[in-house]
């Protein structure tokens, strides 16, 4: 039995790090032959599987690749995959938390991600709205990351219809410490540290923390800026503790807890948001014999979010409060049990069950008049999603592998409500109680891999996924500026059916991967424009009958020497509305916030054991801000550079320059011509010490 199968995610994370580290030079001779280790992936099938046998398109990022990227934020680092993007073009450095939704292959153009993001198997998607708070991930503890484009839904269930992003941390074992500090333009400071203590008797404790602050930048150009505009500042604190204990008979127990607090400015004095979260998890894994292993996971999360909004006059000289979302309490509880059986001959069968319960409510004041908010609204509910899956990977002869999985889920919404009352008189103005709803989803997945030769691999896969709309989409109306969007408690469940064909060709010094895909998204949730005037645009969350996304993805990696590696990644994603009975005028329109072309280029050059140079470039074609394709965001090109000086083992100095190629990246556009811009050029200096 392979040891990775019995010890679950922690050992897999270590194997991923070791495998990628083996491909990097460890001596002053850049042409020294490394020791190649097999690469395993875990996210596609929920059990470690050799990458050569996986039928799905998968990107793997080692810890070193993430650490050496010039990007300041983790989500920017993951943009090394052209398939990965956020709802808007701005990273989590300054983006509003509700705009940090993840999109894979251009299938998630909204704050509510159509992709599932995991940290060691625990969902990071916000319980209330589905967005991702990237700031609460401890970067120094990361062992790597995996992106499964589309194929993960059959085994992961809800929210993974566009794919899965999983972040994997090192299991604490031996005593070790790391401290990293950075300073950058706009009064940006980061201090992060992790300390692991060997407690003896095969147990260890790791404590990690981060302090971060930036004064940010102005999102509007000087000619559009007014007296009310302020920079997009951000501050957060993170504290994480992880404990690992080796038990008899090969079992391992892991526990962890996280505390997180964040405060952000959203461009004016009256627009700010803050977040507070506490979370805990328990992980137990081990063998039940030579061929069977179990993996048990449980987690809990409690958080509070608040955000204020305003209406700004056309002159940008006056702003008026529009909404005070003073508290959004949300909770999540969940767990998973997975059993894996390794057959003689290499076949692997896994079966499991998982569930997730979320509860949340927005508490907000609105309708500002005569110097005060006139109304108060409470809206929210709770949601259950529980499922079970069976997956089997089977070698068919020496060169052919087959994969099949079946998953069934049951979901239910309850306690849905929307209450509104007058803040001046106390009278109840609206008291809606929505009927409980429930349903079932079936998510099959199948794939074939043919290793035609040592150099050539062909793969094909087909799968179906689903997403239950978030509590935010069901129950909470909102208004940003002159755009008001109404909630919809009658939304249907999104489903996606996808087919992939791919080829991987490897020769000494270079590798080519290419593939085509087609996804049919049914009941796609969209913010549909109902009416529009210069003063107010009215929208509502509605289901579009059918959206089709066709695309092509390709990656070329060239390594002429051990010192130099170039990687070019490209995605063509053509997502259009094919049928929309609620808004026939949208048929033929492209999905909002999805560029047709997206590309990234990465260069890594290691002169010797002391000096290395890393560069990344990203480009995207034009995209539309709105569902009607009237508000166009221009194409962009951005480049980042990093020079790394390793003084001695464990000590490193990094000089990075971000956003070099373009000083103007359009991230949002309003009907009256106001254009928000991405971050300007920035220089950053960092030092790190490990011992």
Image (tube, grey):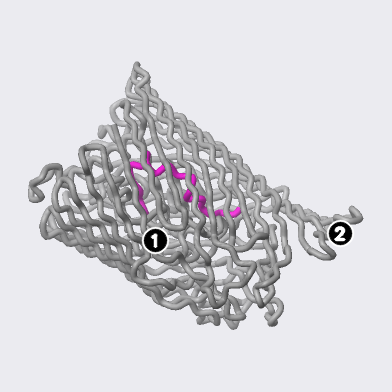
Where residue 247 sits in the image (x, y, percent)?
37, 20
> Does residue 280 lie above or below 561 as drawn?
above
Q: Residue at x 24, y 46 (%)?
A: 39
Horizontal side of 608 relative to 348 (left or right) equals: left
- The answer to which image quadrant residue 63 occupies is top left
Magenta stretch in the rendered image: 129-150
User: Can the viewer see residue 214?
Assistant: yes
Q: CA distance from mark 1 to mark 2?
A: 50 Å
Where residue 450 sits in the image (x, y, percent)?
21, 57
Mark 1–mark 2 CB contact (< 8 Å):
no
| Residue 317 among those drawn in magenta | no
Q: Which residue is the site of mark 1?
A: 682
Element type where label 2 sits in the image: strand
Q: Residue at x 70, y 68 (%)?
A: 319
> Does residue 467 lie above or below 286 as drawn?
below
Element type where label 1 sits in the image: strand
Where residue 374 sits in the image (x, y, percent)?
83, 60
Q: Residue at x 10, y 50 (%)?
A: 30
Where the C terminus falls, by quadrant? top left
> Does residue 676 lie above or below 75 as drawn?
below
Q: Residues within 10 Å of mark 1 (few under 14, many from 20)?
A: some
Q: Which residue is the site of mark 2?
A: 429
> Does residue 495 lie above or below 238 as drawn?
below
């Amino acid at each position: 039995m392979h040891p990775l199968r019995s010890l679950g995610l922690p050992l897999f994370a270590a194997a991923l790090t070791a495998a990628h580290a083996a491909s990097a030079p460890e001596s002053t001779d850049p042409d020294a032959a490394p020791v190649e280790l097999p690469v395993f992936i875990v996210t596609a099938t929920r059990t470690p599987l050799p990458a050569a046998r996986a039928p799905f398109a998968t990107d793997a990022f080692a810890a070193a690749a993430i650490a050496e990227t010039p990007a300041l934020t983790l989500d920017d680092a993951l943009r090394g995959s052209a398939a990965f993007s956020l709802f808007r073009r701005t990273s989590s450095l300054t983006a509003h938390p509700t705009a940090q939704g993840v999109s894979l292959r251009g299938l998630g153009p909204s704050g509510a991600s159509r992709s599932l993001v995991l940290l060691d198997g625990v969902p990071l998607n916000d319980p209330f709205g589905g967005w991702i708070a990237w700031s609460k991930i401890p970067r120094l503890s990361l062992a790597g990351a995996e992106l499964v484009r589309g194929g993960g839904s059959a085994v992961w269930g809800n929210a993974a219809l566009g794919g899965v992003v999983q972040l994997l941390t090192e299991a604490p074992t031996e005593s070790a410490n790391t401290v990293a500090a950075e300073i950058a333009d706009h009064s940006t400071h980061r201090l992060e540290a992790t300390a692991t203590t060997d407690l003896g008797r095969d147990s260890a404790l790791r404590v990690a923390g981060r302090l971060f602050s930036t004064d940010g930048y102005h999102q509007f150009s000087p000619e559009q800026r007014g007296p009310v505009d302020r920079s997009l500042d951000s501050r957060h604190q993170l504290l994480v503790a992880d404990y690992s204990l080796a038990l008899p008979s090969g079992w391992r127990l892991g526990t962890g807890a996280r505390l997180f607090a964040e405060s952000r400015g959203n461009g004016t004095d009256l627009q700010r948001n803050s977040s507070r979260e506490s979370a805990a998890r328990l992980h137990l894994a081990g063998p039940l014999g030579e061929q069977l292993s179990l993996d048990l996971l449980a987690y809990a999360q409690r958080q509070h979010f608040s955000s204020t909004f305003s209406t700004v006059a056309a002159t940008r000289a006056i702003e008026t409060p529009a909404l005070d979302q003073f508290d959004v309490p949300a909770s999540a509880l969940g767990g998973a049990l997975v059993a894996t059986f390794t057959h003689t001959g290499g076949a692997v069968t896994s079966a499991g069950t998982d569930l997730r319960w979320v509860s949340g409510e927005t508490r907000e004041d609105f309708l500002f008049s005569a110097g005060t908010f006139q109304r108060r609204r409470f809206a929210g509910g709770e949601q259950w999603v529980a499922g079970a899956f069976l997956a089997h990977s089977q070698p068919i002869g020496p060169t052919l592998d087959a994969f099949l999985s079946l998953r069934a889920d049951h979901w239910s919404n309850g306690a849905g409500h929307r209450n509104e009352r007058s803040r001046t008189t106390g009278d109840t103005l609206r008291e809606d109680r929505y009927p409980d709803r429930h349903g079932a989803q079936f998510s099959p997945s199948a794939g074939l891999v043919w290793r035609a030769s040592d150099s050539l691999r062909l793969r094909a896969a087909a799968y179906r996924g689903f997403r239950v709309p978030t509590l935010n989409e069901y129950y909470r109306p909102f208004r940003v500026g002159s755009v008001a969007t109404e909630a919809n408690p009658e939304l249907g469940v999104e489903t996606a059916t996808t087919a992939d064909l791919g080829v991987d060709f490897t020769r000494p010094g270079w590798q080519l991967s290419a593939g085509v895909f087609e996804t049919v998204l049914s009941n796609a949730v969209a913010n549909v424009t109902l009416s529009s005037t210069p003063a107010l645009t009215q929208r509502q969350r509605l289901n579009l009958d059918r959206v089709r996304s066709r695309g092509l993805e390709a990656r070329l990696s060239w390594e002429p020497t051990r010192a130099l590696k170039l990687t070019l990644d490209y995605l063509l994603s053509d997502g259009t509305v094919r049928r929309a009975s609620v808004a026939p005028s949208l048929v033929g329109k492209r999905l909002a916030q999805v560029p047709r072309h997206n590309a990234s280029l990465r260069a890594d050059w290691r002169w010797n054991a002391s000096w290395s140079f890393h560069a990344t470039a990203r480009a995207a074609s034009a995209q539309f801000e709105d569902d009607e394709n009237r508000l166009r965001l221009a194409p962009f090109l951005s480049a980042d550079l990093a020079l790394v000086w390793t003084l001695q083992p464990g000590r490193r100095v990094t000089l990075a320059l971000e956003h070099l190629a373009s000083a103007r990246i359009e991230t949002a556009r309003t009907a009256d011509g106001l254009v928000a811009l991405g971050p300007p050029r920035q220089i950053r200096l960092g030092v790190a010490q490990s011992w």
